[in-house]
């Protein structure tokens, strides 16, 4: 299996900009959610029953990022929640990600990848 990458290019809701530029990476061992420069924040095995990344202390918040629709070679979507201190409700919204690096072709991707989609 070739490595697939998606970069979050837009978000809705107050605070969602905190994950813009972050990446979702799929490789033979599973899925990773990384900072824009590649530092892994969370990972999941391929056999995970749901694709929700939970991680703490990124941009001073705790996050839950869920994948709704992951499209190889295309646009993917999901939702996010960011938790501050326990006395406030979480901020939340949706995100959109583009396959490749920032919506541009990624030289590490297999140019012959067939477009496919999977809802999770």
Image (cartoon, grey):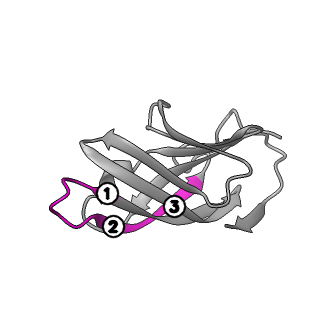
Residue count near mark 3 (Cα–Cα under 10 Å), binned few <14, some 14–19, many ≥20: some
Which quarter of the rendered picture does the N terminus lie within? top right
Q: In this view, does 33 lie above or below 76?
A: above
| SS at mark 1 in the image | strand
Q: Is residue 13 left or right of residue 40?
A: left
> Of the residues under marks 3 and 2, which one precedes in the sequence?
3
- Judging by the rendered image, the residue that carries numbered circle 3 is 66
Marks 3 and 2 sit apart, C-alpha to C-alpha, by 11 Å
Residue count near mark 2 (Cα–Cα under 10 Å), binned few <14, some 14–19, many ≥20: many
Q: Residue 28 carries which label?
A: none
The magenta region covers 82-98
Q: In which quarter of the image is residue 35?
A: top left
Q: In which quarter of the image is residue 43?
A: top right
Residue count near mark 1 (Cα–Cα under 10 Å), binned few <14, some 14–19, many ≥20: many
Q: Which mark is residue 82?
A: 1
- Judging by the rendered image, the residue that carries numbered circle 2 is 92
Residue 85 % position (x, y): 18, 53
Q: Residue at x 47, y 30 (%)?
A: 39
> Of the residues under marks 1 and 2, which one precedes in the sequence?
1
Marks 1 and 2: CB-CB under 8 Å? Answer: yes
Marks 1 and 2 sit apart, C-alpha to C-alpha, by 6 Å
């Amino acid at each position: 299996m070739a490595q697939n990458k998606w970069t979050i290019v837009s978000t809705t809701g107050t605070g969602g900009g905190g994950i813009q530029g972050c990446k979702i990476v799929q490789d033979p061992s599973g899925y990773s959610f990384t900072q824009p420069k590649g530092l892994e924040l969370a990972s999941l095995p391929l056999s995970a029953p749901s694709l929700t990344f939970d991680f703490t202390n990124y941009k001073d918040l705790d996050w839950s990022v869920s994948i709704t629709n992951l499209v190889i070679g295309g646009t993917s979507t999901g939702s996010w929640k960011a938790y501050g201190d326990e006395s406030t409700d979480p901020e939340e919204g949706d995100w959109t990600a583009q396959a490749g690096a920032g919506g541009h072709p990624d030289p590490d991707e297999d140019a012959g990848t067939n477009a496919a989609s999977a809802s999770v």
